[in-house]
Image (tube, helix red, strand yellow):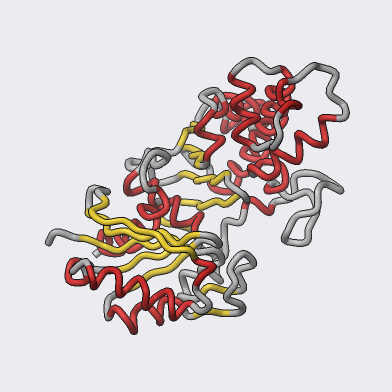
């Protein structure tokens, strides 16, 4: 059978979806503005209509969905703060009732990890941790070839591990979470915190709007202050990865996200700080790699990989 699945990535701003083949080829792709749909039922109907209009419904063997606070076990999105739909949303049931085919759901970071295992740099790995560095910090933990969900479907929230005592206030309500320092948002906050202490003339200070991307671009041009911010970020992330190693002893950490890809030396810098803080038994055993999905339709591939994995198990 020529296996084709529908991959759907539901974000707070955009919902991307596409039909993906066994080798990761995307034969159809589209996106919709999530916020314009007042209920998930309307979004499901719209995706169905678009595929129907393009005569694609008969091609699909299953549906994989990545979404904020998506629970693999329940098939629900549960209290996602960046979606306008409130409470518990039975998303898998909505799609299965409409499409009449097998549907799986997980959170977006878990989907990214499975995407790396099936289509990315982790094809031959059974133990690795995927770290997504975006507006927040997400993670997916693969151990012995299986994604770790925990007893309730919400394992692997490494972005909310506390890395600084009395640190920055996180959106989760806690202080000092990794997300507040190593997300793109956190990198920008570091700029403003360190700017008053900076003694070097920096081209960054002429920027009208500071972003993680602009900081890394200035660093590549040799800006001392920009490189100081990157070093600060890499140190916190590297130290955190050294602690995460103790949980599952992974073969590699795979960094996904815009700024992790923009700076060719960032992975090396993170690995340097990780190695400095590793237990001796783990030293020189663990790789820090860039995602293999960065230049591809990563969100759709990751979501598609979720249901593709279920077919591969069979």
Quarter holding the C terminus?
bottom left
Residue 29 location in percent, x, y? 31, 56
Of the pair 83 and 291, the residue shown nearer to us: 83
Q: Is residue 139 above or below residue 96?
A: above
Q: Quadrant of residue 172?
A: bottom right
Residue at x 64% of width, y 42% of height = 184
Q: Quadrant of residue 201?
A: top right
Q: Residue furthest left?
A: 1
Residue at x 47% of width, y 44% of height = 128
Q: Is residue 221 above or below residue 152?
A: above
Q: Residue furthest bottom?
A: 97
Of the pair 137 and 122, the residue shown nearer to us: 137
Residue 173 location in percent, x, y? 78, 61
Residue at x 86% of width, y 48% of height = 166
Q: Is residue 74 among what the camera can see?
A: no
Q: Is residue 49 above or below residue 179?
A: below
Q: Is residue 251 among what the camera can see?
A: yes
Of the pair 23 and 34, the residue shown nearer to us: 34
Residue 96 location in percent, x, y? 34, 80
Q: Answer with left or right where residue 155 lies relative to residue 111.
A: right
Residue 279 location in percent, x, y? 64, 33
Residue at x 69% of width, y 37% of height = 209
Q: Quadrant of residue 204?
A: top right
Quarter holding the N terminus?
bottom left
Total labels drawn? 0
């Amino acid at each position: 059978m020529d296996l084709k699945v529908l991959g759907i990535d539901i974000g707070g701003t955009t919902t991307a979806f596409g039909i993906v083949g066994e080798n990761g080829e995307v034969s159809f792709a589209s996106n919709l503005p999530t916020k314009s749909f007042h209920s998930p039922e309307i979004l499901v109907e719209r995706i169905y209509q678009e595929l129907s209009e393009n005569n694609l419904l008969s091609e699909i063997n299953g549906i994989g969905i990545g979404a904020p606070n998506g629970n693999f076990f329940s098939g629900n999105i549960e209290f996602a703060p960046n979606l306008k739909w409130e409470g518990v949303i039975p998303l898998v049931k909505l799609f299965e009732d409409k499409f009449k085919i097998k549907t799986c759901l997980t959170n977006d970071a878990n989907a990214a990890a499975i995407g790396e295992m099936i289509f990315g740099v982790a094809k031959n790995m059974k133990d690795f941790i995927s770290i997504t560095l975006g507006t927040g910090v997400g993670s997916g933990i693969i151990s012995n070839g299986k994604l770790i969900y925990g007893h309730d479907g919400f394992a692997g929230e490494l972005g909310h591990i506390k890395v600084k005592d009395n640190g920055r206030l996180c959106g989760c309500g806690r202080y000092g979470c990794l997300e507040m320092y190593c997300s793109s948002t956190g990198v920008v906050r570091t700029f403003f915190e360190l700017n008053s202490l900076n003694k070097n003339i920096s081209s960054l200070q002429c920027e009208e709007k500071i972003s993680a991307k602009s900081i890394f671009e200035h660093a590549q041009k040799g800006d001392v202050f920009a490189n100081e911010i990157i070093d600060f970020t890499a140190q916190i992330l590297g130290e955190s990865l050294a602690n995460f190693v103790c949980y599952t002893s992974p073969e590699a950490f795979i960094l996904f996200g815009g700024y992790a890809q923009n700076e060719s030396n960032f992975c090396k810098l993170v690995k340097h700080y990780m190695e400095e803080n590793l237990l001796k038994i783990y030293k020189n055993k663990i790789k820090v790699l860039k995602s293999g999905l960065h230049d591809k339709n990563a969100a759709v591939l990751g979501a598609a990989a979720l249901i593709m994995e279920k077919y591969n198990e069979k």
